[in-house]
Amino acid sequence: MVIGTPRGFRDILPGEARAREAIRDKVRACFDAHGYVPVETSLLEDRSVLERAGRIKGSPFQLFDSDNRLLMLRPDLTLPIARLTAQRLDRADLPARLRYEAPVVREQGALRGEPRQFTQLGVELIGGAETDSEVEVVTLLAETLRALEVPRVRIVAGSVRPLLALLETDVADASLREEVLAQVHASNLVALDEAVDAAALHELPRLHGDASVIDRVDELLEGACVPAERRGTAELRALVAGVAGAEAATELSFDFSIINSFDYYTGIIFKAYVDGVAASLASGGRYDAVLANLGMPATAACGFALSLERLQEVLGARGAADAPAPNVNIEARPLRIAVPKGSLFAPTLVALEAAGLPVDDLRDYGRKLIVAAGDVEYVIVRATDAPAFVARGGADCGICGSDSLIEADLDLLQVADLGYGACRFIVAEPADRAGQAERAYAWRGAMRVATKYPRITQAYYDRIGQQVDILALHGNIELGPIVGMTDRIVDITATGTTLRENNLVIVDDVMECTARFFAGPAAYRCDARIRDLADRLAAATAKKGE
């Protein structure tokens, strides 16, 4: 038996602990210099209270206490501090400048290689002046990262208000609005395009650039007859004006793909990125609705949280003298693309060549795992592994089927539908057992299904309102119902030949699948080459369709 910590948790030894302490000291000094005072919140929170405040980030650890109250270990600090403010502070105490440094825990699925405990360092400005709040916290974030000597910081901002205003104007159906919001929240721009036929809604999440991009947001909203006071662009311009002349101005850009936290933030959202790290160093924004939900209406609230572990990753501060800070410049290295092996490889080669990329050395890569071709590096992976490589920074962007993206369930942006690799997900059963699955479901209360795609299968049965017991297999899943282990299968089919040869018939369609071009959020928002490649792939796909 191995004696150690639970999965996703770890001990910090003295050398690393001192390095982490040094980082915290610098961050704390910056926060103190701007008048932010320390607070500490309860390790356990009443889930019902925080749910009243706003959407809970991540999957929290939960437990019942002896009073049968459902408690949870805090998965972040913003909601607990909002709860503390509403419970313990009066209007006379505002504005409140609060800072914190504390561990948080979030549940993560097994075999994902992700930590379940990490430390947040952050500030919350509650009850500040309307447009000055964002200017203050964004400036403080930039100053803090400079004090830490973090190289090549990029602060990317957006706002949820333009999207919500467009939806209210262009989409009358409430259920369709919910679907659009769900696709935006999932960073699935392809599904967003398919869900609604509105050019402005297609364009808005793809807008990016310097402050001039705000003009284009205004044009889109004016074209949709959205009144100026509902657009959210005035506060974006105020942010630009507020940081003008400060060093933060050189680090600030705008990207409206960042607007996926619409049910938590109510205005400006921002994230800090640095080359070489696949996730944001910091994230924050305006969340007035959280305070309103807790009984403090008309109270401005804005803040951000830094990840101590990601700062360590950037600064090389793991407690070892020979661990220098990484000095990555994404624009000076090849663009790394995850290319799928197997059936998607040949059409992917065609698509990349049509987009103008060099592919001669990729045609016959032999046993190579990485193929260098000028300004590009191709990482050869299984299609099912491509999402993990991109999400964890092993590649900047990649191509795989939409099914692989659903099954991976990672933080990625689906940018373009490439149109090839089309197949159907279906439900099938033995032809000579028609009606048996329904009869078994009637007395058992659950459908037994074999599949290689448990997430897709679960989502399908959730959609049709049936309980399902999923048996995950890795091959020959047709055998499941044939030998009596399950009632049905959920699988991919292109021609149906394998089904017919094994006396299986299709009883329902689940979804259609095609190849997608996708990217990691940090890479997509910081590396212009990815957007350029996405545009060229989309143009080549459209030309092929014609």
Image: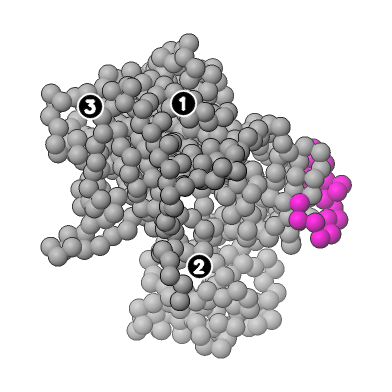
Task: Locate residue 337, reporting x and y percent.
Answer: 70, 46
The residue wearing badge 2 is: 454
At label 1, which amino acid type do we have? Ala
Is 13 or 40 nearer to us in this picture?
A: 13
The answer to which of 243 and 190 lies nearer the viewer is: 243
Are the residues flagged by discs 3 and 1 in contact, CB closer than 8 Å?
A: no
Of badges 3 and 2, the one in the foreground is: 3
- Horizontal and vertical percent for residue 244? 46, 12
Secondary structure at numbered mark 2 = helix
Q: Amino acid at mark 2?
A: Pro
Quarter placement of the N terminus? bottom left
Q: CA distance from mark 1 to mark 2?
A: 46 Å
Q: Identify the residue shown where x is 60% and y is 79%.
A: 478
Q: Is residue 412 above or below residue 132?
A: below
The range drawn in magenta is: 349-370
Q: CA distance from mark 3 to mark 2?
A: 47 Å
Query: In the drawing, does residue 91 fall left or right of residue 136?
Result: left
Residue on which disc 1 sits: 147
Measuring from the top left, give residue 275's x and y in whole percent. Answer: 59, 35
Question: Which of pointers 1 and 2 lies earlier in the amino acid sequence?
Answer: 1
Residue 109 appears in the figure: yes
